[in-house]
Amino acid sequence: MHPSEEIFCTKSSKLRGKTIIMGITGSVAAVECFATIRELIRHGAKVIPVMSADAQDIVTPASLEFASGNTPVTRITGRAEHVSLLGDGSVADLFLIYPATANTISKIANGIDDTPVTTMATVAMGSGVPMVIAPAMHDSMFRNPAVQKNVEQLKKYGVMFLGPNVVDLRAKAVSKEEVIAWVFKLMSKNDLKEKKILVIGGRSEEPIDSMRFITNRSTGRMAVSIAERAFERGAETELWMGGCSVPLPDYIPLKRFETVDELMKMVAKIKHDAVIVPAALADFGPMSPKKGKIPSSGPINVELVPVPKVLPAIRTKCKKVIGFKAESGLDRETLIARAKDRMETYDLTAIVANDIDVSGKTTSNAVILTKDAAKDASGTKDSVADMILDVCAEIL
């Protein structure tokens, strides 16, 4: 068994049956392609590397064969690799150039195909195979008017560009995570295309003094799962996040809040088609937070008062709102009854009711309620996120 087979579909089967041709050119960012190839395989993709001669000065064909389980194409031979991989009737689902240099971008824009990568690009564009380019170079090179003209020309031809991310005068290749997310997006059913979806997640943190606060154990994982899957399914996604203990995607627009009051001030900016709110927000907060740090000696009394309810405020700004109701130790009928009451009181489009006693850090056991139905939703948080978005797609 090749080492690449050991990781095949170990994270998901989202890309099972998909073949991705990855072009690698002579940027130092080529060192990132090894991990990206492995991640694509973990989600079920078959990845075939294609390397320019300059790329081979940075990463070796042997290392990429180890990463992918396929022999890289390092030159076009009598086997007509460009036609068999990307020509009419080929099995390729996507041609991804990661990273792409200014030289490669400009050659492709002008129909020059003097490397394996540019030759593959010529054929892909002619046969209609989707092509994605992730540039990586010094920022002054990327800002060169000729390079910018070539980028715009390729966009007119239907080529998608990812990044670059400009950091310290360097136009860096986008992260592995962003590449994977966009591949998912391109390969998804795209049922949320052109829909603006806001996900509000994480936990609120109500201050006792300048150092201490009242909060809860929410990790924010469900909100991230929903935001990622909404993005992958074609939505224009935004994430508002309170406190959390999970990594946040760097490719989804993000706003942060700490307290319920801060979130309430943000609600006025909602202009979305749907809002999904798995946030764990406080019901009570300290009445008079102290400036500075309360001395640690001796007992203190903290008087708690109700904080504003956010869902009703959101509902005034958006017609399609999916709320969440967390309970503990209830039978299914009582859980559904309480969730229905919340849904009707706040005039929500749908609500997700879950029992925290049977949900875990990476799993959820919930019921998704609409005005007409109750659907059980259990499994990983990613799979439950998809079920929630199925409902979202239906109501939109």
Image (cartoon, rainbow, N blue to C red):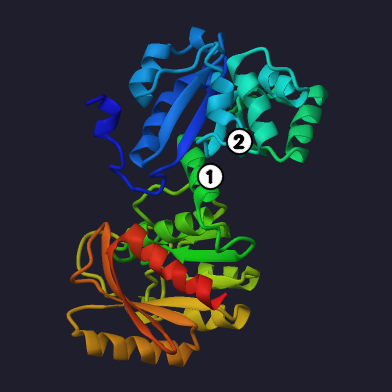
Query: Element under label 2?
Result: strand
Residue 265: x and y in percent read 58, 71
**Left or right for 52, reference 222:** right
Relative to residue 9, is residue 119 depicted above or below? above
Relative to residue 238, is residue 56 depicted above or below? above
User: Which quadrant is home to the N terminus?
Assistant: top left
Mark 2: amino acid: Val
Residue 36: x and y in percent read 43, 31
| Residue at x 35% of width, y 48% of height | 13
Residue 319: x and y in percent read 59, 81
Residue 366: x and y in percent read 29, 74
Q: Which residue is mark 1?
A: 182
Residue contact at pointers 1 and 2, CB within 8 angstroms: yes
Relative to residue 260, is residue 108 depicted above or below? above
Relative to residue 242, is residue 377 depicted above or below? below
Q: Who is closer to the viewer here, 243 or 116?
A: 116
**Left or right for 366, reference 93:** left
User: Which quadrant is home to the C terminus?
Assistant: bottom right
Q: Which residue is mark 2?
A: 132
Query: Element under label 1?
Result: helix
| Residue at x 51% of width, y 20% of height | 50
| Residue at x 51% of width, y 77% of height | 321
Q: CA distance from mark 1 to mark 2?
A: 9 Å
| Mark 1 surroundings: few (<14), some (14-19) or many (≥20) residues within 10 A | some
| Residue at x 60% of width, y 36% of height | 132
- Which tag, 1 or 2, sits closer to the chain's start? 2
Q: Is residue 203 visible?
A: no
